[in-house]
Image: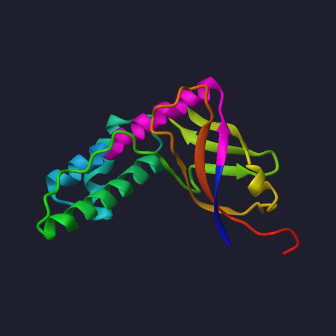
Amino acid sequence: MQRTIRLKLTPSIAQAESFAETRRQFTSAFNQAVQLGWDADVSNATKLHYLAYYAVKAEHPTLVSDLINQARVKAAEALRSAFALQKRERKVSMPISDACPPRYNANTYRVDWESQTVRMSTTGGRQTIRFGVPDYNAARNIAAKYHASVAIRDAGGLPVNQPIVSNLRVEAQAAGR
């Protein structure tokens, strides 16, 4: 069974600043990939990769390659949607984001349920951050299997000393199964 749970990450101030910088660079990488795809009329993810990867990497050297690829995938999704609307003769402008949350995957994070920590890639390197499982999920005895993605969602407006709330889709199973 798959279940989405919200975890409260409790980063240090330095870790929160690193996440804020990662979010800023991810948003910038997304917007740059969208701009390149929009100008070239490209929404195919593979073609957009060949068109944008090196330009985006040169502009964001501290953003890990997998996060650049995830920004490009998100850009391709946004462009595909915009071009589909344009084909239906709807008025469309280039997609742009003020705060595009990074899309983490199996290559950019690891969860340790025993110690309740997650190790995530940021512009400041990999960071190990503690998290808390809400009481309504703790009773379910979540297994150590996880997959899919983590999306840091804070709209860019949180002070750095507040916990970051993230969505983590996990494969959960009850004890004894």
Range of residues picked out in magenta: 7-30
Q: Position of residue 126 (x, y in %)?
A: 61, 38
Location of the N terminus by quadrant is bottom right
Residue 154 vs residue 9: left or right? Answer: left
User: Which quarter shows the C terminus?
Assistant: bottom right
Residue at 45 percent of width and 45 percent of height: 101
Q: Does the magenta stretch include residue 25?
A: yes
Q: Is residue 57 visible?
A: no
Which quadrant of the figure has residue 139?
Answer: bottom right
**Residue drawn at 65 percent across, 32 percent down:** 11
Q: Where residue 40 sits: x, y (%)?
A: 15, 55
Farthest residue in the left direction?
89
Residue 27 placement (x, y as % from top left): 37, 41
In percent of the image, x 45 and y 34: which residue is there? Answer: 156
Percent position of residue 30, x then y: 34, 46
Is 86 magenta? The answer is no
Q: Which of 93 and 59 is in front in this view?
A: 93
* Residue 175, image quadrant: bottom right
In the figure, residue 24 lies in which quadrant? top left
